[in-house]
Image (cartoon, grey):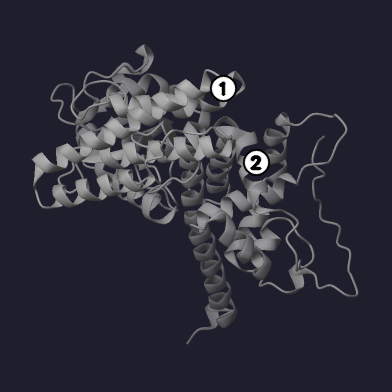
């Protein structure tokens, strides 16, 4: 069933106060709510619904507004629900006419809405942020034809992985699942496994690596015993084979993997999609998450350095090989063809599309550089503070959404929150300019009569 979208009725209620009579109409969040084309979002998000009978879903403006506010102010789902009840500006932004004392949604509604929309439809929020920027004068369409592209790592909300902790955790998960399903194990190793983990950590801290390795072998042996015990018991319980398939597969991979071997490894049991990515940082040699491509305009717009495109890139691809996928997706997002693309030296040997190959300029190249290209290279580092803001202020530093789809969704919504934060500042500044102009005009209505 399709959602029942909200429309402005203008009705009054004797026992409830209208939000437009409570809030300040010049507040930047109120201005932004009137500037966004909510009909466009309803059309884009309405594709996932059908006309079958059933309970109607929540309105699109409510859920889209919550997604924007969450990453705009760096709030968790729980905190956002609490703030929404207290804040009339949040309620007005989400399409309410009267002040609500109980939220019309549940915290889990946001999770289900994000999963239903997915990355491909949430891109509409990023497109709308760029459209609002052009309509309000914060940016011009020509600003997005020349871009800077760089990659960063969106880390996952996991603990730092070590072999000892992973094997101990894999044994705990198998024992707990066996207890829930009524599978009686020969031994659970709860006490012995915990002691072995503590010994390994203490010996490793004291740099007694021979003893630490002995404790690590003990943990591997214990995990192998539990895996074999569960496998033997499942031979008499074929109905539980599917339930134990994934935990057993992850436990075997954790037991068999070694520190310096090549290939895909498991770094977290609750997030097996996590990858180990080395970015060459002295203070943090390795980061555990997913690689994300970020594109910003080459020249700063009037309203700030907006994010034109963002995309999660699972599989830890080489930066230069990502342009074949990123450039067409970027052009679809902004609705125009790119004229110039500036990258860092990590994009050497890129696989950009053939028609765009000579429009990509990699830092460090010497041939075919005009003065304009040399000036553009001096602007390449403008993308770095944008990445810093995305991580520190808009929930990209630690992703709590589940799975590879959660990685892609969180990256898009972080860019949406960043763009709308710039728009809030721009609308507040624009209103201040208008008030200053009105004040100056009213102070001297007849300039020719000045002394």
Image quadrant occupied by the N terminus: top right
The image's mark for residue 112 is: 2
Q: Which SS class for mark 2?
A: helix
Which mark is first along the chain, 1 or 2?
2
Q: Is 354 situated left or right of 442 in this image? A: left
- In depth, the one of 85 and 330 nearer the eye is 85
Q: Residue at x 49, y 65 (%)?
A: 429
- In depth, the one of 4 and 229 nearer the eye is 229
The image's mark for residue 230 is: none
- In depth, the one of 357 and 179 nearer the eye is 179
The answer to which quarter of the image holds residue 77 is bottom right
Residue bearing mark 1: 242
Q: Is residue 161 above or below residue 426?
A: above
Q: Residue at x 52, y 69 (%)?
A: 432
Q: Residue at x 34, y 18 (%)?
A: 352
Q: Is residue 210 above or below residue 79?
A: above
Q: Which SS class for mark 1?
A: helix
The answer to which quarter of the image holds residue 372 is top left
Total marks placed? 2
The single residue placed furthest to the top in the displayed view is 354
Q: Is 228 situated left or right of 129 in this image? A: left
Q: Residue at x 76, y 56 (%)?
A: 104
In space, the residues marked 2 and 1 are separated at their CA atoms by 25 Å
């Amino acid at each position: 069933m399709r959602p029942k979208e909200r429309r402005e009725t203008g009705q009054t209620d004797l026992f409830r106060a209208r939000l437009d009579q409570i809030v300040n109409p010049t507040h930047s969040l109120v201005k932004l709510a009137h500037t966004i084309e909510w009909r466009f979002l309803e059309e884009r998000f309405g594709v996932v619904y059908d006309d079958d009978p059933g309970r109607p879903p929540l309105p699109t403006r409510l859920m889209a507004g919550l997604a924007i506010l969450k990453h705009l102010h760096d709030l968790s789902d729980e905190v956002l629900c609490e703030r929404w009840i207290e804040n009339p500006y949040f309620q007005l932004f989400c399409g309410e006419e009267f002040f609500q004392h109980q939220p019309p949604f549940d915290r889990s509604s946001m999770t289900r809405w994000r999963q239903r929309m997915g990355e491909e439809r949430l891109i509409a929020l990023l497109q709308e942020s760029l459209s609002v920027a052009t309509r309000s004068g914060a940016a011009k369409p020509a600003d997005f034809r020349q871009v800077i592209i760089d990659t960063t790592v969106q880390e996952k909300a996991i603990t730092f992985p070590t072999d000892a902790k992973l094997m101990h955790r894999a044994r705990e998960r198998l024992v707990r699942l066996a207890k829930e399903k009524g599978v009686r194990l020969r031994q659970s190793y709860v006490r012995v496994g915990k002691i072995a983990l503590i010994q390994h950590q203490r010996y490793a801290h004291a740099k007694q690596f021979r003893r630490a390795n002995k404790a690590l072998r003990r943990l591997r042996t214990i995990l192998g015993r539990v895996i074999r015990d569960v496998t033997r018991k499942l031979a008499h319980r074929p109905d539980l084979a599917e339930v134990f398939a994934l935990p057993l597969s992850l436990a075997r991979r954790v037991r068999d993997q070694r520190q310096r071997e090549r290939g895909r490894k498991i770094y977290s049991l609750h997030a097996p999609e996590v990858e180990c990515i080395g970015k060459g940082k002295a203070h943090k040699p390795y980061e555990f998450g997913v690689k994300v491509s970020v594109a910003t305009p080459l020249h700063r717009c009037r309203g700030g350095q907006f994010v034109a495109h963002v995309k999660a890139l699972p599989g830890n691809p080489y930066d230069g090989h990502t342009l074949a996928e990123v450039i067409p997706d970027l052009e679809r997002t902004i609705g125009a063809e790119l004229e110039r693309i500036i990258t860092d030296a990590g994009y050497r040997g890129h696989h950009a599309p053939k028609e765009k190959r000579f429009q990509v300029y990699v830092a460090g190249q010497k041939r075919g550089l005009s003065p304009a290209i040399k000036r553009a290279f001096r602007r390449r580092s403008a993308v770095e503070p944008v990445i810093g803001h995305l991580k520190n202020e808009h929930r990209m530093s630690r992703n709590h959404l589940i799975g590879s789809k959660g990685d892609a969704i969180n990256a898009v919504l972080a860019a949406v929150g960043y763009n709308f934060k710039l728009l809030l500042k721009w609308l507040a500044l624009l209103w201040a300019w208008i008030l200053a102009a009105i004040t100056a005009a009213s102070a001297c209505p007849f300039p020719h009569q000045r002394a």
